[in-house]
């Protein structure tokens, strides 16, 4: 009876140990290679428990060995749990830092997109202005010549009007002078 109870306790201890190992493995992904030695010890412990069921003569000696190994494993698990908790805190801080840097990168990316859009708009505006300047430069001589021709025709028209007025004025002055002289 005592042996069965001990075996059940050992089985429960083994089950609890295996659960704790599974829990640590899921949390410690990268630290898996550090646990290889502990996993080998647990496997060895499991084999020893199976051997205990077959041979009852060695049960007492093997139970003592398993208890010692389990206690050592529990201490190691507790140490690893503490390490995992410390590493989890560090990972949380790193995650916060990564999130902050990601937010900053996203803002910079949006600013770059806005700057690129503004630069593209400015580039298009500069192209439009250059095209307008080129068109004006090409058309300025033609426009100036056309304006000069209009001005010339108006000046010629006014010159002929002025000449006619000058003749009339001269005739009028001559007539007035004759009248005055008479």
Image (spheres, rainbow, N blue to C red):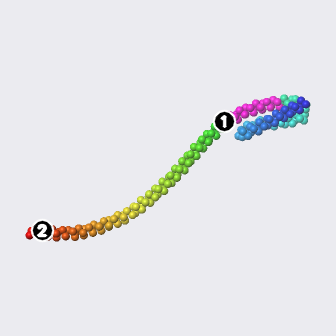
Residue 42 image point, x, y percent: 80, 36
Q: Which of the 4 quarters of the picture holds residue 87?
A: top right
Residue 102 image point, x, y percent: 60, 44
Nearest the viewer among 163 and 138 is 163
Numbered label attached to residue 125: none
Provide the secondary structure element on which disc 2 rests. helix
Residue ID at (82%, 33%):
13
Residue ID at (11%, 69%):
179
Q: Main secondary structure of the magenta part?
A: helix
Q: Is residue 82 left or right of residue 116?
A: right
Instruction: Evaluate if marks 2 and 1 touch, with contact meaning CB atoms under 8 Å apart.
Output: no
Residue ID at (89%, 29%):
2
Nearest the viewer among 117 and 82 is 117
Q: Which of the 4 quarters of the picture holds residue 146?
A: bottom left
Nearest the viewer among 132 and 176 is 176
Is any atom of residue 30 visible in this view?
Answer: yes
Residue 132 position (above or below residue 165):
above
Q: Which residue is mark 1?
A: 89
Q: Which residue is mark 2?
A: 177
Q: Which of the 4 quarters of the picture holds residue 32?
A: top right
Q: Is residue 136 magenta?
A: no
Q: Is residue 87 left or right of residue 124?
A: right
Q: Residues within 10 Å of mark 2 (few under 14, many from 20)?
A: few
Residue 147 image point, x, y percent: 33, 65
The segment highlighted magenta reads 66-86
Nearest the viewer among 89 and 56 is 89
Q: The N terminus lies in which quarter of the figure?
A: top right
Q: Residues within 10 Å of mark 1 (few under 14, many from 20)?
A: few
Q: Is residue 85 magenta?
A: yes
């Amino acid at each position: 009876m005592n042996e069965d109870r001990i075996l059940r306790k050992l089985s429960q201890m083994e089950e609890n140990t295996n659960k704790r190992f599974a829990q640590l493995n899921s949390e410690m992904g990268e630290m898996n290679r550090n646990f290889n030695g502990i996993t080998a010890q647990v496997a060895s412990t499991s084999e020893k428990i199976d051997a205990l069921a077959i041979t009852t003569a060695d049960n007492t000696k093997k139970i003592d060995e398993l208890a010692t190994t389990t206690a050592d494993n529990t201490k190691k698990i507790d140490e690893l749990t503490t390490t995992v908790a410390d590493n989890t805190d560090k990972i949380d801080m790193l995650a916060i830092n990564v999130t902050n840097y990601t937010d900053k990168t996203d803002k910079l990316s949006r600013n770059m997109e806005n700057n690129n859009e503004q630069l593209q708009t400015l580039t298009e505006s500069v192209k439009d202005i250059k095209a307008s300047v080129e068109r004006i430069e090409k058309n300025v001589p033609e426009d100036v010549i056309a304006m000069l021709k209009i001005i010339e025709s108006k000046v010629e028209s006014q010159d002929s009007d002025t000449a006619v007025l000058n003749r009339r004025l001269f005739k009028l002055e001559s007539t007035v002078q004759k009248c005055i002289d008479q």
